[in-house]
Amino acid sequence: MTPANTAPARQTRKRTRIQAENEERILDAALEVFSSYGFRGATIDQIAELCGMTKPNLLYYFRRKDDIYLAVLHRTLDAWLQPLETLGASDDPAAEIRAYIDRKLQMSRDNPKASRLFAMEIVQGAPVIGEFLSGRLRQLVDDKAAVIRRWIARGLLRPVDPYHFIFMIWAATQHYADFDIQVRSVLRLKPGDNSHFDTAARTLEELFLKGVVVGS
């Protein structure tokens, strides 16, 4: 599978509102199925049934299961890059880091299945998104590492490796999505109780800000 194959079947015409809505329905259902069964275990029939379409109708929008999987992953990646893209928009590293942690936790709370699907892809060696990881993502992290280095040079942050600092934020925030069952079991949370995210935000902000922000 390559990015060149991600286009929906009906790509030669401008999408109508209904077509756009149907594609989103398909991708929402596909996320549910892929995050539950993985790429190999998922079927187009399962996706079609979940989104309330016939299989031929679904194939009007996406030719193959591969195309649906790629589209789901790329939608997830686009959403995940937005918080990192805004990191460093101000000269206040404490506010920037706090906002980034909060946005990442919010994504783990609101869309844990996307995080788990991404984790499954990575564990399998990133056969679909390897090019993305070594291209667009790597360049973005390089850019944000430069921002962190500038903060350090100005005496606003303690010396820290910017890459591993970013990795630690990813690990700490995405844990609440990827290991949701474990977290809920240990904390004795009832289904639908997301109160632990407020505590997680305060705890992570305390740890990261006091660890690196000068004067915190």
Image (spheres, rainbow, N blue to C red):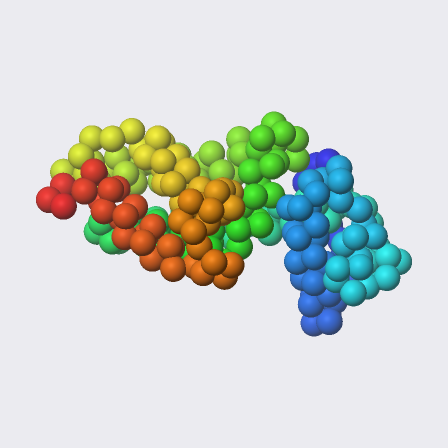
- Farthest residue toward the right? 56
Q: Position of residue 1 (x, y in %)?
A: 73, 36
Please report the residue visible at 66 percent of the width from the left and 53 percent of the height from the top. Answer: 32
Check the image and report above or below for 146 versus 25. Answer: above
Circle count: 0
Check the image and report above or below for 20 versus 196. Answer: below
Please report the residue visible at 80 percent of the width from the left and 57 percent of the height from the top. Answer: 48
Q: Quick one: 190 or 50, which is closer to the camera?
A: 190
Q: Quick one: 164 or 146, which is closer to the camera?
A: 164
Q: Position of residue 96 (x, y in %)?
A: 28, 51
Please report the residue visible at 65 percent of the width from the left and 31 percent of the height from the top. Answer: 127
- Farthest residue toward the left? 215
Q: Quick one: 147 or 72, which is closer to the camera?
A: 72
Q: Is residue 120 left or right of residue 201?
A: right
- Farthest residue toward the front? 188
- Asked which quadrant contains residue 171, the reply is top left
Q: Position of residue 119 (x, y in %)?
A: 56, 38
Q: Quick one: 63 or 211, which is closer to the camera?
A: 211
The answer to whether residue 88 shows anywhere in this view is no
Q: Is residue 86 left or right of residue 178?
A: left
Please report the residue visible at 65 percent of the width from the left and 51 percent of the height from the top. Answer: 31
Q: Is residue 189 left or right of residue 20?
A: left
The answer to whether residue 175 shows anywhere in this view is yes
Q: Is residue 59 left or right of residue 101?
A: right
- Farthest residue toward the bottom? 17
- Asked which quadrant contains residue 55, the reply is bottom right
